[in-house]
């Protein structure tokens, strides 16, 4: 009953007119971002942070954090739905989690059933979002209570595990992902050491004494980098936009989709809880499950509505599930939640086990707002499917300058220094070069955010033990997490060796390196 009382307080916060507008604005922007191929939720959330910071300037820190995270969460799960539109209408995924949707969604569109595919995607997204939130409500407090018992040793192990899992699933090469993680951790050390007061890697530049600003790095790498990539590679939208005729699904469509939506919601939620797994893996798993349980496997790839319903439900449930490690443990489960964590830290709100005690308005207001946001998504996306489809055809000559303007004005409005604008440009160029050479950007941002937490807990543990490193082997839970980390990092190399020696079928092995 205590959880329901907290939830009621959360709804009281979420139903404030200001937060309702933030939720509405977030889901509209998120859907719009999702239908634009290549931008994705990470770039969208990074781009919106300076805007939220500007428009919440007159609020108290608690109210500003609540309103900002409500909007950013709306962008996150709105983009999850929006990504399906381009997959279905022009066979081009809006973001990685919608890749699977192209297999059957585009075939349905070619058959004149684009409206039904988009509607089932919206219905599945809504149901999955609600299922994920129910799980979040009942798991958040128990996990927070468990995490409160963690000491610096356990937290060090947990952060190392979080860094390893996200790095292990980011990009095609684990080596490159680990390089980016180390780069992020290195950047996090720039500035004045909070314990000794010694300036580190500042090169006698006062502007660096406070460290490198997370916002500038995130917007530069994702938003500016994506614009430069689009311009350099002429990565514009191609293909004919399929017509949308009927919008509402038939009774048969609803019947065929009901179980895939349910299975995808459950599967996606539990995969989303795992740090680093994310929506992309959830959607692929869901598609595999639906194909394996289907009596007519031949229909998959030819316009099976189950191939749209299951993966779309799974990727939306995973986005809700990924908030659990962020809110309860303070460990981002994906690149997008890492950026959201950075936004909370900007308002001096520390995600983790004490969030629900110290900042209940932020935690429960966010959870309640996601119920409202998912309902708004369903209400908006069903009748406005044709409107959002028009966004897909936005000419780059209009879209790219708008993104650049928002990025530059937003970063300058928050930091008010020319140094950050130069850093923004440098990060944009670096982001383009790195992504063009298959270096994943999310591990760098994750390392930048988790670096101070890792360093502080590591030093606290050594202080307690008077410099004895064996303290990290004195906790059973820490040892278990370290073992999982080692196995996780070693698994691609092991699979390669097994495949090379024909112990395993090479076609069944999908390593990240």
Image (tube, grey):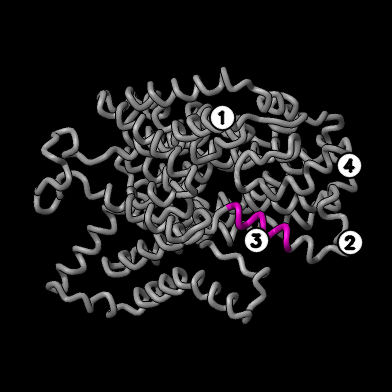
| Residue holding disc 2 | 296
Q: Earlier in the sequence, mark 1 or mark 3?
A: 1
Residue 293, relative to residue 411: is it above or below? below
Is residue 443 left or right of 453 when viewed as pictured? right
As helix, strand or loop, the secondary structure at mark 2 comes to loop
Quarter-wise, where is residue 251 in the image? top right
How far apart, in angstroms, are the residues tagged by discs 4 and 3?
25 Å
Start-end of magenta stretch: 279-288
Q: Earlier in the sequence, mark 4 or mark 3?
A: 4
Q: Residues within 10 Å of mark 1 (few under 14, many from 20)?
A: many
Q: Residues within 10 Å of mark 3 (few under 14, many from 20)?
A: many
Disc number for residue 29: 1
Callout 3–callout 2 Cβ contact below 8 Å: no
Residue 438, relative to residue 239: is it above or below? below
| Residue holding disc 3 | 267
Disc number for residue 250: 4
């Amino acid at each position: 009953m205590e959880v329901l009382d907290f939830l009621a307080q959360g709804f009281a916060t979420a139903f404030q007119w200001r937060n309702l507008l933030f939720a509405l604005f977030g889901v509209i922007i998120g859907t719009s971002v999702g239908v634009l191929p290549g931008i994705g939720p990470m770039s969208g959330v990074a781009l919106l942070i300076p805007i939220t910071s500007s428009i919440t300037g007159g609020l108290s820190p608690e109210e500003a954090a609540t309103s900002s995270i409500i909007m950013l969460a709306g962008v996150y799960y709105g983009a999850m739905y929006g990504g399906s539109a381009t997959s279905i209408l022009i066979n081009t995924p809006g973001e990685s989690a919608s890749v699977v949707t192209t297999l059957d969604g585009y075939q349905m569109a070619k058959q004149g059933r684009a409206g039904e595919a988009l509607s089932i995607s919206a219905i599945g997204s809504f149901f999955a979002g609600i299922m994920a939130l129910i799980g979040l409500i009942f798991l958040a407090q128990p996990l927070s209570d468990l995490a409160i018992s963690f000491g610096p040793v356990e937290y060090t192990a947990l952060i190392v595990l979080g860094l390893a899992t996200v790095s292990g699933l980011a990009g095609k090469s684990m080596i490159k992902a680990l390089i980016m993680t180390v780069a992020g951790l290195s950047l996090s050390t720039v500035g004045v050491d909070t314990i000794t007061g010694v300036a580190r890697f500042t090169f006698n530049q006062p502007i660096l004494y406070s460290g490198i600003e997370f916002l500038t790095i995130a917007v530069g790498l994702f938003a500016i980098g994506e614009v430069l990539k689009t311009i350099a590679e002429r990565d514009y939208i191609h293909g004919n936009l399929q017509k949308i005729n009927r919008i509402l699904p038939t009774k048969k469509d609803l019947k065929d989709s009901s179980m895939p939506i349910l299975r995808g919601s459950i599967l996606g939620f539990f995969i989303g809880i795992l740090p680093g797994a994310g929506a992309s893996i959830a959607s692929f798993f869901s598609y595999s499950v639906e194909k394996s349980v289907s009596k007519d496997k031949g229909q998959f790839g030819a316009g099976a509505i189950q191939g749209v319903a299951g993966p779309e439900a799974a990727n939306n449930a995973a986005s809700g599930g990924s908030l659990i490690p962020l809110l309860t443990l303070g460990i981002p489960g994906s690149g997008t939640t890492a950026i959201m964590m950075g936004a909370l830290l900007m308002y001096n709100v520390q995600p983790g086990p004490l969030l629900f005690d110290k900042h209940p308005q932020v935690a429960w207001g966010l959870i309640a707002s996601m119920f409202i946001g998912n309902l708004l998504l369903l209400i908006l996306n069903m009748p406005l499917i044709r409107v959002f489809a028009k966004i897909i055809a936005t000419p780059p000559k209009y879209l790219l300058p708008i993104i650049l303007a928002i990025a530059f004005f937003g970063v300058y409005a928050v930091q008010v220094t020319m140094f950050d604008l130069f850093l923004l440009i440098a990060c944009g160029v670096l982001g383009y070069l790195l992504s063009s050479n298959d270096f994943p950007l999310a591990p760098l941002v994750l390392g930048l955010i988790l670096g101070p937490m890792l360093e502080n807990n590591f030093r606290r543990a050594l202080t307690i033990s008077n410099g004895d490193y064996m303290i990290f082997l004195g906790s059973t839970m820490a040892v278990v997490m370290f073992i999982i980390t080692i196995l996780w990092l070693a698994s691609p190399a092991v699979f390669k060796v097994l495949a090379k020696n024909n112990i395993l079928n090479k076609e069944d092995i999908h390593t990240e390196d």
